[in-house]
Image: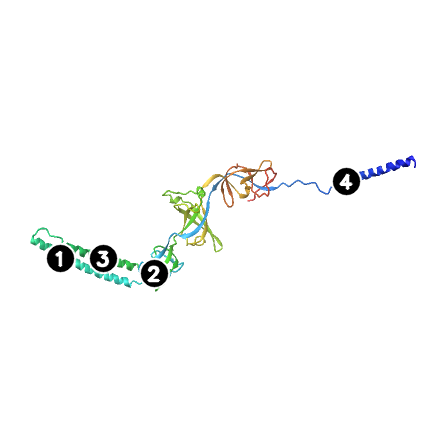
Amino acid sequence: MNEKSRWLQLILPAAVLSAAVGAAWAMIALRPSSFPAPAEPPVPQVEVVEVQPQTLQMNVHSQGVVAPREAIDLIAQVSGKVEQMHPALVSGGFFKADELLATIDPRDYDYAIVATQAKIAEAKRVLINERAQAEQALSEWQALGQGEASDLALRKPQLAEAEAKLQAAAADLAKAKLDRSRCEIRAPFSGRVLSKQVGRGQFLQAGATIARIYANDIAEIRLPVGINELAFLDLPLGQAGRAAHWPAVTLSAEVAGQPQTWRGRIVRSEAELDSSSGQLFLVAQVEQPDHSRDGAAPLLSGLFVQAEIEGVARAGLYALPRSALNNLQQVKLIDAEQRLMFRDVEILRSEPGRVVVKSGLQTGDRVVVSEMPLPVAGMRVEAAPSQP
């Protein structure tokens, strides 16, 4: 083998290897990328409001059950058979003040009146006789001229006894007439019947319950209010003569599938806090609850109602939706560079639909009111006006 063949045997494999390495490097370097370059994350759009201080009415919400102002048991004060009953003496019936509701058989009491009148006539006869005898005894003693006479000689004890028996007979007559008047059972006030316990012809003992009735001129509702909520109400607690300054109250409930409202007024507070809840009960009154006004349904006794008590007005407050706060109760704001920031604020009051901020905000602050899944301080956002 000559010199040239030996050189070819040495150079040719090295050249082939170099060409293969270069081709492989070119294929790796020049191959298309299988993963695109990551895109910039989109800037989230948020709803923003520019806050302004406001004067807000700090109404207080509560709830309670409607009850009559006065409910009593109608009691028979004398015994006897029920002779007559008013047609309205049924559950739900209406009656007026002093209306005759039931009558007990009065004949026994009429007889007692006649018998007592006879006793009075007899007592008067005895008294007249004793007065005559007393005058005769005095005259006879004066005629004898034997000094000062004793009371017994002048029949003074007998005369006093006769006068006392006449007074007792007169008292018996008054008692008989009183019992006779109690045979007529009248309504002490205008109202309605809750329940009836007797029927016509039934014999009653004195003290038996005839019916349970209630006054329907005024309905009352006990409304529990927390101690902290009292700061938002103008209540004349412990002050006399300020009945006209108690706040108004609006009651609401659903009756027959329709929302209904009634207007009333707080008239007093109870004397002590409830020991179990630490709340103070305010008493609201609604006049003529059975009379519908402007198409509203009657305010029925036993109805559960929601109440909104008129509160005081406070200036310099900011009302925000609850979505304006994060989990740390901080307000979400947007600065001049369109970046998100958080600020601590002092919350005066939290309500079901909003929060009332007392301090920590300034006029013109842009507050984010829309929900954000993962808000991070410093992230860029795009502001959009909040929809009402």
Q: Nearer the viewer, residue 98 or 12?
A: 12
| Real-space Cα separation, disc 1 to disc 3, in angstroms | 23 Å
Which kind of residue does numbered mark 1 sit on?
A: Gln
Which kind of residue does numbered mark 4 sit on?
A: Ile
| Real-space Cα separation, disc 1 to disc 2, in angstroms | 51 Å
Q: Which residue is mark 4?
A: 28
The outermost residue toward the front is 1
For marks 4 and 1 on the same chain, the one whose residue lies earlier in the sequence: 4
| Real-space Cα separation, disc 3 to disc 2, in angstroms | 28 Å
Q: Is residue 374 left or right of residue 355?
A: right
Q: Nearer the viewer, residue 151 or 46?
A: 151
| Real-space Cα separation, disc 4 to disc 1, in angstroms | 156 Å
Which-is-in-front pick, marks 1 and 2?
1
Q: Nearer the viewer, residue 295 or 368?
A: 368
Tag shown at residue 170: 3
Residue 288 appears in the rendering = no
Which kind of residue does numbered mark 2 sit on?
A: Ala
Q: To which quarter of the image does residue 377 belong?
A: top right
Q: Which residue is mark 1?
A: 133
Element marked by disc 3: helix
For marks 3 and 2 on the same chain, the one whose residue lies earlier in the sequence: 2
Which-is-in-front pick, marks 4 and 3?
4
For marks 2 and 4 on the same chain, the one whose residue lies earlier in the sequence: 4
Q: Which residue is mark 2?
A: 102
At 46% from the left and 40% from the top, the residue drawn is 314
